[in-house]
Amino acid sequence: QNQHDDHGLLTNTLKLPYRGQEHPDFTSRYDEKETMDLLKQGNAGGGYCQAWYGRRFFKRVKVDEQPKPHFGLGLECYVQWSSPIRRFSDLQAHAAVKRFLRRKQINRLIQTGQPIPHELQYTDIGCALPVSVNDKHHDHDDIDHD
């Protein structure tokens, strides 16, 4: 897979595991919806009972590379992002952002004719540097490897 454009810059797209959740279907479960409305009207538990009961209507979360709305959180798009030691998908999201930022910095260095750090590995950026760039630059360390 070619990771360089016609100008010798690294292609740089950010693919993340977006979590989307569709709007719930209240119409097909009339009796349960009525119970939820009664909980809301009575303000049972300060609203917490209605909110908890309402979770039964939520649809399953779907993960996709394309941003989708997340009904339960009320957001236009959502990427779950916490400690990368907890879930593999979080580790993937952290790594994707790091690769994206490193490639952005490498492209800036290429465009301005500055040296590219020779310590960079394939795993740091997800591809090899252009051969012409590797031949020209080997002296500075301008990229964060963490």
Image: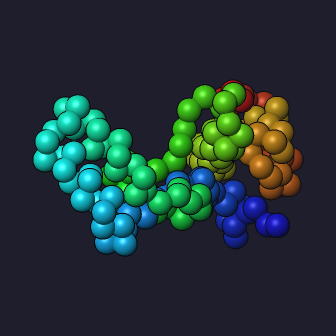
Residue 67 placed where, x, y %?
A: 49, 61
Which residue corresponds to the image point at 19% horizontal and 46% vertical from the top-left?
Answer: 40
Q: Along the horizontal axis of the image, is 96 left or right of 30? A: right
Expressed as whole percent of the image width and height from the top left, the position of residue 101 reads 59, 43
Q: Residue at x 51, y 47 (%)?
A: 79
Expressed as whole percent of the image width and height from the top left, the position of residue 143 reads 67, 32
On the question of residue 69 being in view, the answer is no
**Residue 140 % position (x, y):** 73, 29
Quadrant, the C terminus: top right
Residue lying at 69% horizontally and 28% vertically, measured from the top left = 85
Between 59 and 86, the one lying in front of the other is 59
Q: Nearer the viewer, residue 68 or 59?
A: 59
- Answer with the quarter of the image where residue 87 lies: top right
Is residue 139 at least partly visible in the picture? yes
| Image quadrant containing the N terminus | bottom right
In front of the other: 9 or 23: 23
Q: Is residue 27 above or below residue 98?
A: below
